[in-house]
Amino acid sequence: MSDPEVRAESAPAVAPATARARAKDKSPWNWLLFVPIVIPLLTPLFNHDSPRLFGFPTFYWLQLLFIALGVSTTTVVYQMTKKRG
């Protein structure tokens, strides 16, 4: 009951220009995205109880700092790699 032509027409077409543009994006700014990935993996940074910030142990407030680091790094990379005009 399923016609091959109908299935081929319903498949979403991928724009080749978009795929090629994405594959050619070799900006050195993209390397900066490794910073928010690697920094939280360094467990000696937060493997202790002090210093406390507003009563919170290091682990908790440092996790919030890692989120801010990830957001700011992603924003910088986006702004530096987006195509102008």
Image (tube, grey):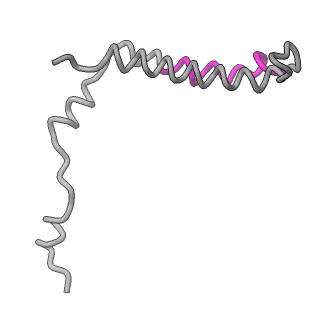
Front-most of residues 19 and 83:
83
Farthest residue toward the front? 54
Which residue shows up at 16% across the image and 43% down it?
15
In-front residue for pair 34/78 = 78
**Which of the two residues, 30 or 63, is positioned nearer the viewer here?**
63
Q: Is residue 27 above or below residue 17?
A: above
Q: Identify the residue at image location x=34%, y=16%.
A: 79
Q: Position of residue 1 (x, y in %)?
A: 19, 87
Q: Main secondary structure of the magenta part?
A: helix
In the image, residue 81 sits, relative to residue 21, either above or below, namely above
- Residue at point 78% right, 20% down? 46
Which residue of the protein is positioned furthest toward the bottom in this rendering? 1
The answer to which image quadrant residue 69 occupies is top right
Residues shaded magenta: 33-47
Whether the magenta-drawn stretch holds residue 42 is answered as: yes
Q: x and y percent of residue 54 in the render?
A: 82, 18
Q: Is residue 63 above or below residue 16?
A: above
Image height check: is 2 above or below 32? Answer: below
Q: Is residue 68 magenta?
A: no
Give residue 73's position: percent from left, percent from top: 49, 17
Residue occupying the far left of the picture: 5
User: Which corner quadrant of the image does residue 38 belong to?
Assistant: top right
- Using the rendered view, name the quadrant where residue 68 is placed: top right
Residue at point 11%, 72% (across, down): 5
Left or right of residue 54: residue 41? left
Left or right: 10 in relation to 60: left
Q: Quadrant of the C terminus?
A: top left
